[in-house]
Amino acid sequence: MPLARTRSVIVIGVAGQLVEVEADISPGLPAMAIVGLADTAVAEARDRARAAVVNSGEDWPNRRITVGLSPASLHKHGSALDLAIAIAVLGAAGKIPIDALADLVVVGELGLDGRVRPVRGALAMALAARDVGCAIVVPASNYQEAALVPDLVVHAVANLAGLVGLLRGEILTGAPDTTPTLTPSEAGSVPDLSDVRGQVAARFGLELAAAGGHHISMLGPPGIGKTLLAERLPGILPALSGEAAVEVTAVHSIAGRLAEGQGLISRAPFIAPHHTASVAAVVGGGSGLPKLGLVSLAHHGVLFLDEAPEFAQSVLDALRLPLESGEIVVSRSGFNVRLPARFQLVLAANPCPCGLAGSMVAICQCSSLQRRRYLARLSGPLLDRIDVRLQLAAPTLAELRGIEGTVESSSVVAARVALARHRSERRLQGLPWRTNAEVPTTELRKRWPLPADVVASAEEAFETGHGSARGLDRVVRLAWTVADLAGHQSPTALDVETALLQRTGRGRWAA
């Protein structure tokens, strides 16, 4: 009985899941059935595959064809299985050697004329193929992305006829002969910190957040520079490491945000959703197979919520868990999917609905009750997870005029941040954490205990009701970052007081 099998990949969450594709041709009326929990897009592959095979100059078997997708219990979705289905059918029909399909993973969407269209998540698919020791066939448009995976043989095809020729041992023409490169737009595209005039305290808070991976909030009237500062945070963050760059690139590929031919994303991403975004859009999920949310797109980068009190309460509350765990768990009937969400949160808020409270240019018309209700939209449990809380004051005219060259640029600040990160990484060497903000409380106390006189100011704030137990631990974490920036071996009492001042926001944000 003619039978052929090959393998393909679908993406579940952010991971590639191998699918075995079998094709069986048996006597009977001409028909084709696809079995194995296939969704509509996969079921329609029978029509795309038949048209592509015929238009590529090959004969389609006029018998009963059964295509099986294993594991049968896994929901199959998308059009990335098209090319594997067509090749398996041709293998079962004896048009190509069955042995050529062994140790091969095939992904790609078919056009009716036989063209192979690009797919989302090619990097995740390539990683799955490498893990099982197989070569992978990808659309030509996805070649650079798949070729980023080391120790993997990648074949790129532009059409079905090209893949058939490759499997028959013919010379494959038109294959791309390039090597993966970094995205050309990565360099020089991030706004520079030298554009910010004044705001000395806020600049230090931003530097502190970058050095330790801490979350940050900014309170101040409109036009004072909150968005300006937030947009410049990625410019002072260290470049992504190799592993982190692959993770971020894979996430953006799955979301369809990679341009054709784009290489590794080496810069921390910056995601700024509109305040009308829904919970599913921000944290991911939705009906059916879970979709990536904006928090996953901000993985290893920055999530900026401008006008934070205007966001729905459900959206803000949904951020609590990923702020602690660095991931989103989406549960559906029959399966759970873990989506990465290790990001730095930046909140920006006006002091009141009109934004003029404390302004020197106009009088606020909001009542005290309106002001309290407005800021109360940022719940206590959410703010308790924010380490650096800044109250921005209006810059003077002299600061706005400034003198060119007197304001530090992003490169100067980034050098200090990199040095502080190096000190913390040396301390955390061999441990699963990259920044001070990620270190669990138990490990912080056990591995790096501080003398009682050093943490006295933080403990006094806790005892007088000005902070929670979580807040006390976060002050200590922040103090380690202050020490790293200052070049201290461990935090001093002054470092702890500085961290406490950054944490309390000079009295406007409750600790």
Image (spheres, rainbow, N blue to C red):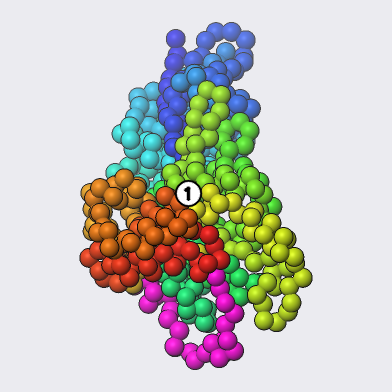
> For residue 2, what is the image quadrant?
top left
Nearer the observer, 339 or 129:
339
Relative to 428, 369 lies left or right: right
Residue 447 magenta-highlighted: no
Magenta residues?
A: 391-415
Most distant residue in the top direction: 28
Can you say whether 5 is above or below 338 in the image?
above
Amino acid tagged 1: Leu
- Residue at x 41%, y 69% (from the top left corner): 207
Q: Percent from the top left, x then y, of residue 189?
A: 50, 70
Q: Percent from the top left, x then y, of residue 276?
A: 69, 52
Can you say whether 379 is above or below 16 in the image?
below
- Residue at x 39%, y 23% (from the top left corner): 98
Nearer the observer, 305 or 66:
305
State whether residue 406 appears in this view: yes
Relative to 353, 208 lies left or right: left
- Residue at x 42%, y 60% (from the top left corner): 461
Relative to 113, 325 lies left or right: left
Q: Percent from the top left, x then y, of residue 25?
A: 51, 14
Name the residue carrying label 1: 323
Nearer the observer, 230 or 148:
230
- Residue at x 43%, y 73% (from the top left corner): 204
Nearer the observer, 87 or 57:
87
Please rate how many residues cluster around mark 1, counting C-alpha atoms within 10 Å: few if below 14, some from 14 to 19, many from 20: many
Relative to 430, 58 lies left or right: right
Element type at marker 1?
Answer: helix
State whether residue 269 appears in this view: no
Q: Quadrant of the N terminus?
A: top left
Most distant residue in the front direction: 464
Most distant residue in the right direction: 365
Q: Percent from the top left, x then y, of residue 260?
A: 51, 53
